[in-house]
Amino acid sequence: MNNNQRPTALIMLFGATGDLANRKLYPSLYRLYKKGKITERFAVIGVARRPLTQEQFKSNIKDSVLSAIKDVDEAQLDTFVTHFTYHSHDVSNKSSYAELKALAEEMDAEYGLEGNRLFYLAMAPEFFGPITQHLKAEGLTDTNGYKRVIIEKPFGTDYETAEKLNNMIRASFEEEEIYRIDHYLGKEMVQNIEVIRFSNMMFEPLWNNRYISNIQITSSETLGVEERGRYYDKSGALKDMVQNHMLQMVALLAMEPPIKLTTDEVRSEKVRALRSLRNYSEEEVLKNFVRGQYGEGTVGDTVVADYRKEPMVDPNSNTETFVAGRLKFDNFRWAGVPFYIRTGKSMAAKSTKIVVQFKDIPMNLYYNPTEELSPNLLVIHIQPDEGVTLHLNVRKSGQKGLTTPIRLSYSNKSVDRMNTPEAYEKLMYDCMRGDATNFTHWDEVALSWKFVDSISKAWKEKSDTDFPNYKAGTMGPKKADDLLAEDGNEWWPIEDFDIETCS
Ligand code: NAD
């Protein structure tokens, strides 16, 4: 490994006692340490409001690592936690940044960090702008090494608030120093979309409107809002999932091949793809998008109450817990090919999958009056199973002239899942090495919000919803099926496409 593969950093983690830090960030840092991707030359200052002793903080970190990782070397974990220091600090209080600065300088000298600073803002979004402003005002960004800031989601609640936030952050950090997290971009199979497309001769020449009939992206959850009712009821599925994760997957599927795999080239192709996504008028939104809210039903063996009866949810809420949409691109590659997306809560399956449906062959020699020839499908399994399945037709054994569909599958689990890094592990490592490819550029965020804002606006105008309009434990409202039926298509039953059952 060269030096850039073993970066040094002082990580200043704002929100150090929070859920994200405990569930994801500490275990991810430990994995990097265990694999030797970060050496002894790293330090973490955990910042949060709660008073904690250094011992309590270190013990929390140990608990978080031990509960997430099975094969922990306890002696190594003891050394790992010596790199952590806790600083109780109210981030809106300007004066305590001076103490933080002194502490940062101390840690910098102690661990030989060359002034490299990574500020991770794992806190509620209203703090993102003020923290970056204080960091600059109090001199924490004056450093000889690199300075980078990781911003968690959500990045704004619409285009206007996102732009305001961006301007605040830009007053302290350059665009190339801002790492906006979309953790889907850290997922193994999302990163694989580009590899599947651009390293296989059998796909890229067919990756256009001559050979592809439609693309379907489903990200369904079986869980409801749980304890996130207060946040979710203000956000809804459109802002929580479509603006970021769904549109990022769409962009990776639709973009042109970049001339190189550099951050700038990949991002500029994604931006170009998002620019060619058709922005709908209000009338078009109502024709191309469907919203839903779950009502009472059964998910697995669990009886789920109406969304409107969930804790911290307005009993008259019109917030959508489901969105389906038909996206259209106005460019040569994709004109005429619908990209269907759907995402929701309390659905029948927990699954994120992409189904690329190829067109029917021009003449079917194997016509079977009882069964139509299945189209070829490329299924990319994003989560929880990871892999790729190709649906082909072969001869039905012993039956001249008849065909049967088969699936060729690659499951990442069976091959190297054990070594597959977690999304946050990859993203933190990328940030320390200065690779922003799998983070979202402001231009992507801006275009995504503009697209989503036109949907929110149209829905706001037409506030008479028929909620609840799908039963918990189903794949969403009937209108989502009607959307595809209008084009002569239907959703592929992704709940039956589990890679484990494919052969
Ligand atoms: P959380 O509420 O569990 O933690 C918030 C943290 O901020 C705590 O450490 C708290 O002490 C600290 N804090 C609050 N006010 C403070 C103040 N005035 N001064 C100093 N510290 C203060 O939140 P979370 O779930 O960890 O989420 C953090 C961020 O990560 C949010 O932006 C969220 O949207 C995002 N996120 C979280 C998850 C997740 O799984 N939890 C997933 C994706 C994104």
Image (spheres, grey):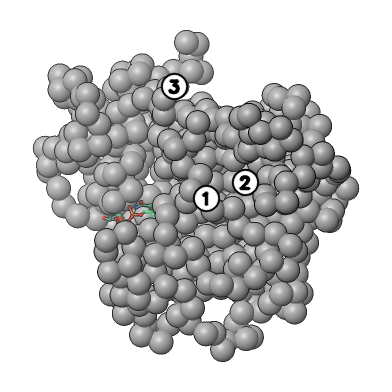
Helix, strand or loop at disc 2?
strand
Whether residue 67 is situated above or below residue 109 in the rendered picture: below
Question: Residue 444 placed where, x, y %?
Answer: 66, 51
Up the image or down, 292 lies above or below 349; here it is below
Q: Could you tell me residue 212's position as x and y percent?
A: 77, 45
What x and y, as percent, mark residue 267? 69, 40
Visible residue check, residue 370: yes
Q: Are marks 2 and 1 in contact (CB under 8 Å)?
A: yes
Res. 120 mark: none
The residue drawn where x is 33% and y is 67% is 298
- Give left or right: position of 95 versus 318: left
User: For the image shown, how many numbered marks are present on the structure?
Assistant: 3
User: Residue 63: percent from the left, percent from the top?
Assistant: 16, 38
Q: Which residue is mark 3?
A: 415
Whether residue 199 sits left or right of residue 190 in the image: it is: right
Q: Nearer the viewer, residue 246 or 426?
A: 246
Q: Please report whichever mark, 1 or 3, sits nearer to the chain's N-terminal start.
A: 3
- Decide which of 92, 394 is in the foreground and name it: 394
Label drawn at residue 355: 2
Q: Is residue 126 visible?
A: no
**Residue picked out by circle 1:** 494
Q: Earlier in the sequence, mark 2 or mark 1?
A: 2
Could you tell me which residue is drawn at 27 percent across and 69 percent down?
Answer: 303
Q: Is residue 420 above or below residue 474?
A: above
| Badge 3: residue crowd in 10 Å (few <14, some 14–19, many ≥20) | few
